[in-house]
Amino acid sequence: MPEGPLIRTEDLRVYFPVRKLFRTIGHVRAVDGVSLAVNRNETVALVGESGSGKTTFGRALLGLVRPTSGRILFDGTDIASMGEKELRLIRRRMGIVFQDPYASLNPTFTVYRIVEEPLVVNKIGTKEERREMVMKALEEVKLTPPEFFASKYPHMLSGGQRQRVAIARAIITRPAFVVADEPVSMLDASIRVEILLLFREIQKRHGVSFLYITHDLATAKYFSDRIAIMYAGKVVEEGPTRAVLSEPLHPYTQALIEAIPDPDPMNRFKMREVVPGQPPSLLNPPSGCRFHPRCPYFMKGKCEVAEPPLYDLGDGRKVACYLMEERAGNR
Ligand code: SF4
């Protein structure tokens, strides 16, 4: 197995132009200088409020959104500047599971056709070989007996079953990397655990790396090895999941976490409904630290003047906040 992370970004930026009367009047900076790695056989949770840029980042990693600048190294090869034809070959080694299992499945296709589709598109296997692969994938996601589910249409299935179909479709090409974008947020709590356990099983069996995009710290705690907190297009804190959740260092992470003693591990951490203050506009973000208008520790003359670097605190922890300057310097 090659050394190094499976996929990593270097200073990745994705800007979307905003036009008015045929003129570009500005750019929405959805992803603004993110350097993040996902190691082999690892799950990284990317956590943030809606509109923080996490979905755009995940799509950029899959080549579904082209970056404005920066690099995306997949197995050491920069895919950010690749042409569509080359990228298509790389995408065979990647998969995606979306939030809404109903909207992401073609309602006019049978389960068989939905799961087979990536094989057809990528010209993998004969008809007979594809049949075998589809049945195996359905078994793997526990839609058994597979022959029973293969002939169903999405509307005949429950939400959890639909998401299992979406997972079967995502893993059928044996991807090394899967982006799971809020894959359990529309499911009942009991089904959530089952689906996350299924991801874990798949990871164990095939060594898949996951980028798990979520706004939910409880499931991030349950499923991820490392966590990255995204705010207004930037990663503001990163580190091993347990360390970040037990000792959040960035004021934004602290605002997100409300530790509630609860015997149920899925309820141990809850995202606050509202972090005080408004999320900033990505068209015209605040100067300096983007969190400064909402930060209880705001230091005038410093925080609004220049953007804090992502301080490396050791042990895999990184925090973009001036409060960490001394701690980083004392290493
Ligand atoms: Fe708050 Fe300043 Fe740290 Fe930003 S840099 S999070 S404004 S203390």
Image (cartoon, rainbow, N blue to C red):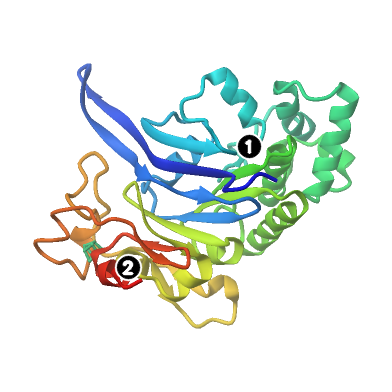
Q: Position of residue 111 (x, y in %)?
A: 76, 35
Q: Position of residue 73 (x, y in %)?
A: 52, 37
Q: Which residue is mark 2?
A: 328
Image quarter for ligand 1 equals bottom left
Q: Where in the figure is residue 24, as x and y percent of width and height?
A: 22, 23
Q: Is residue 159 left or right of residue 59?
A: right
N-terminal-most mark, 2 or 1 = 1
Q: Hey, what amino acid is under mark 2?
A: Ala
302 lies left or right of 94:
left
Q: Secondary structure at mark 2?
A: helix
Along the viewing direction, whichever of 91 and 252 lies nearer the viewer: 91
Quarter residue 74 falls in: top right
Left or right: 92, with 59 as reference point: right
Q: Residue at x 14, y 56 (%)?
A: 304
Q: Nearer the viewer, residue 230 or 160?
A: 230
- Indicate whether 114 appears above or below 326: above
Residues 206 and 202: in front is 206
Please give the residue where the numbered disc 1 appears in the rendered image.
94
